[in-house]
Image: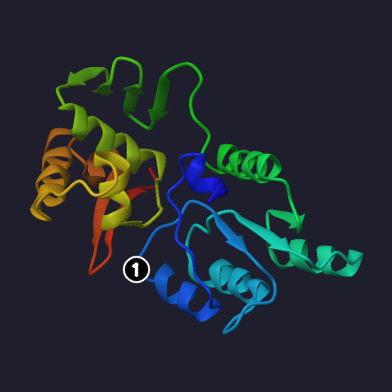
Amino acid sequence: MTLAEAGHSCEVFGDGQVLVRALHRSTYDVLILDWNVPGLSGLEVISWVRENLEIAPPSLMLTSRSAEEDIVAGLTAGADDYVIKPVAPVVLKARISALARRAYPAALSGFEHYGSYCFDTRAETVELSGEPIALTAKEFALALLLFRNMHRALARAYIFEAVWGRNPNLPTRTLDVHISNVRTKLHLRPDNGVKLVPIYSYGYRLEALAS
């Protein structure tokens, strides 16, 4: 409730195994994990994430276990932050915001450079090797999302929500059409140093290729 009121879209899992199954099909920006849950413990989920996801989302342990050895074990396992319950809502929101800022920094200047591509986030324009490329607002948002998450697999549902908002009530082909347009207009191909990869039954991943 605290995070939803702050504008975050949240899913709740009462079992670590269920969360791991969800991670096979969905993309999440931050994981909040209790230590003692059925299925897999919070620590076991962190270990699975670190071993199986190419880019692990930041994780916060939110637990009543306050012993020093528990805190050390949680952070050693890979947790990015460790918060002891109970926690004030304002503190939890601040912790989550800090994790998100570190993991997904936004450009302060309004210009973001990715190889030969330059995005002007204020004007919502993009150039390839200095040449402007005309994109619609949604195409720009989709392209920027892909570039900001380079090498990170993005689920279709995650992309839909990030670009079109929650419950957009659009045909499923809408995303495929926009992906095709972005791929064509931005020339997302190896000779420009990038490759857009479809992931079967999941979504898409943009990859930067070594020069």
Left or right of 169 in this view: 56: right
Picture quadrant of residue 70:
bottom right
> Which residue, given by chain and number where applicable, does mark 1 sit on?
25
Give the residue drawn at x 46%, y 40%.
7
Q: Is residue 34 above or below residue 163?
A: below
Q: Amino acid at mark 1?
A: Arg
In the rendered image, residue 124, in percent from the top left (x then y), is placed at: 28, 21
Left or right of 178 in this view: 84: right
Q: Total number of numbered labels?
A: 1
Picture quadrant of residue 135:
top left
Taking depth in this image into account, of 113 and 9 the one nearest to the observer is: 9
In the rendered image, residue 202, in percent from the top left (x then y), is placed at: 28, 65
Q: Is residue 158 above or below residue 74?
A: above
Q: Please, what secondary structure does the residue beneath circle 1 have?
A: loop
In the rendered image, residue 155, in percent from the top left (x then y), is placed at: 31, 58
For label 1, the crowd category at 10 Å Cα-Cα, with few meaning under 14, some 14 to 19 and many 20 or more, is some
Taking depth in this image into account, of 179 and 190 the one nearest to the observer is: 179
Give the residue drawn at x 42%, y 18%.
110
Q: Is residue 67 above or below residue 55?
A: below
Taking depth in this image into account, of 116 and 13 the one nearest to the observer is: 13
Picture quarter with the C terminus:
top left
